[in-house]
Structure formats: structure tokens, C-alpha cells
Amino acid sequence: MQKQVHGGDIYSKSYKLDFSTNINPFGMPDSVMLGAQKGITLAIHYPDVEYRELRSAIAAVEAIAPEWIVCGNGAAEVIFGLVLAKRPKTGLLIAPGFAEYEQALKTVDCEVTFYQCQRENGYLVDVDYLDYLEQKPEIAFLCNPNNPTGVLIEEELLDQIIDTCKKNNILLVLDECFLEFVAKEKQNPQKGRLADVPQLFILKAFTKMYGMPGLRLGYGMCSDEVLLNRMKEVLQPWNVSMPAQYAGIEALRETEFVNMTRDYVQKERAYMIAELKKIGFTVYDSQANYIFFEGPENLFDVCENRGILIRDCSNYRNLTKGCYRVAVKRPEENEELLEVLRAHHTAQRR
């Protein structure tokens, strides 16, 4: 199994800027912070074990039944709870991809097959992925846009993937945690297919868009209520704290904040990609709030020595030393990173 390394390791390293985690550059909205504070004042009570108010708020925004929603202490807990409830014997993952999928599957001794995304194809999931689904794994995980590459699955292919999973009774876990950062016209959310495809499980989180990773709140959506009830049996009671529940309720009201963030990310990401290409790096077609690129093998150390943390992606399956991911942050922060990268490139050419 690939080594478990994450971004955001600010506790073992001194740093000035953290580009290694993909959090909203504008941080947590004031209303969300006030919601968390309200939760603290109510924390003398146990939280609602069914998180009914939060589920109702999510259901209203997603336009689905509250009974189709399960919440967790971050999206990671939802992933592990789902795997423990399903206990699949065979699974399909893509490489490179988010490490927690494999970590969760290994806890139930699941035999994992990997679909290798090809560098020469921009790390896209291609039509041959359907051949892997014809082997009928019990569960498959897809992240759209992918982490760490940020690339989207082509719309027609995603439809075919969902249809194939329905036909072969494969539980498809579609991770849409970064979809809100994608331009509206490219988003292609799949919640509209939940009713007719009980094999579809959509994963979402409040972490990135609302700048609240420390509060831990994620949720899953699925029309298979038998599966959701099994998940409740394996998840701990009171797994979503009062501060997280009330922060989530307030976050769902922040439509203007989400739209502003999305517009900003689109513009600033395009600028950063253009500048990284000018420096001479190979940059891939990320549609999320982060950029995946290839550069010198010592780039992580160079940045760290300047107090800047970037994500070294060499621990991802199917990636090597020299692969990196950086978040889109505020203009002055992005410029500081770019200046370090430009200076290093210039020094290397002398």
C-alpha cells in the first residue's frame, strides 16, 4: 500500500505559506464560524445522534430525501464507514488517486485492482476503464475532479461508467468533494441519478469550500437505505459534534461565498497555470482549486527552505519524484510562490 502522507503537515514543520492543502483561499466564512461557536455553547448536551437539522438542510440544498444522507466526522469517516458496512472482497481504484480509498479497503482485506491513468493522456480516465468494470469488482472509487491531478471525467464516459456499475451491480463511490470549485458549466454533478441507480454513492465534504478542515464534516448520498442503515450500525454514535453540525448548517446558506470563490479560483488558477508553463514546468489540466505539475526533483526542499509548503506527490501510486500539487491561494501568496519557483529555475540555468 502506498505510504500515507498528506498535505497540511504544519505541526512538524515551520512554515510561512501552506500550498500543500486545497482549502478555500478566503478561509472560513464568518457565519460558519459563528455557527461553530453556537455549537460550542450547546455542547453541554449530546449532539443529535441523527443530526436531523443538518440532514434536512443538506437535503434541501441537494434536493434529495433526508433518508438518503449519512454524515461523518469528515469525508474520511464516511469512506471508512461505507467500506466497513459493505465489506467488499474486490475493489477498483485509479492511480494516481486519493490514498484513503485504498487504506479503507485494506482494513477489510479487500483485493484491490488499479486502473493506471496514463501520463501521455494527461492522467485522464479513458474509455478502457469500462473494461475493468466488466470484471465486476464489488466496489469502485472515482474522484471527480481527481485528486491530485484535478482532471475531470468526460461527461459521456461518466454516464457509461454509472450505467455499467448499475448493470454489473457494482457500488460506485463518486467523490465530488472538489466539484464546487469547478466552473459551473463543467461541473456535471450526478445526484440526479441517485433515484434510479442505488449502486451510486456520492461523497461530499464541507472541508475545502468552507475552510473548516479542523471541524471535520462530510456526507454521503445514496438511495440504498439498507446500505445506509448498515453504515449507521458500524459508525460510532454522536460522530458529528455540535460545532460541526451548526457550522455545516450555516455553510449551506453561503451561496454567494461559494460563487465568489469559484469565480476567483477560475481566474487565478488560469494565471498560475500560465506562469508555471512560462517557467518551463509541465502542467496538467486541473479544473479544481489546485494545480498539478512536474518540476525539478528538489523543488519541495527548495520551497520548504523558503518557508513554503507544497505537496510532494511522489507517494501517490503511478507518480514519481518531481510531481507536485499546489493550492490556489490569494494573489499575493501565489505571487510569492511563483517568485521562488522563477528564482530557482533561473539559478538552475546558470
Image: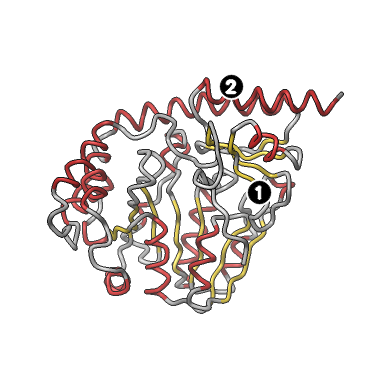
Q: Nearer the viewer, residue 82 or 31?
A: 31
Residue 258 at what x, y percent from top left?
35, 33
Q: Nearer the viewer, residue 54 or 305?
A: 305
Residue 261 at what x, y percent from top left?
40, 29
User: Which amino acid does the dot numbered 2 rest on?
Assistant: Glu
Instruction: Name the N-terminal-most of marks 2 and 1.
Output: 1
- Name the residue rendered at 59%, 23% in the picture: 336
Q: Determine the secondary structure under disc 2.
A: helix
For label 1, the residue is: 123
Q: From the image, which quarter does the N terminus lie in?
A: bottom right
Residue 326 at what x, y percent from top left?
58, 37
Question: Left or right: where does residue 267 sit relative to residue 58?
Answer: right
- Name the residue rendered at 67%, 28% in the picture: 276
Q: Nearer the viewer, residue 227 or 350?
A: 350
- Measured Cα–Cα span from mark 2 to mark 1: 27 Å
For label 2, the residue is: 335
Question: Left or right: where does residue 75 sit relative to residue 247?
Answer: right
Q: Is residue 217 above or below residue 49?
A: above
Q: From the image, which quarter does the C terminus lie in?
A: top right
Q: Please, which colouring scheme is shown?
A: secondary structure
Residue 97 at what x, y percent from top left?
58, 55
Number of numbered callouts drawn: 2
Q: Determine the secondary structure under disc 1.
A: loop
User: Which amino acid does the dot numbered 1 rest on?
Assistant: Tyr
Q: Nearer the viewer, residue 7 or 295?
A: 7
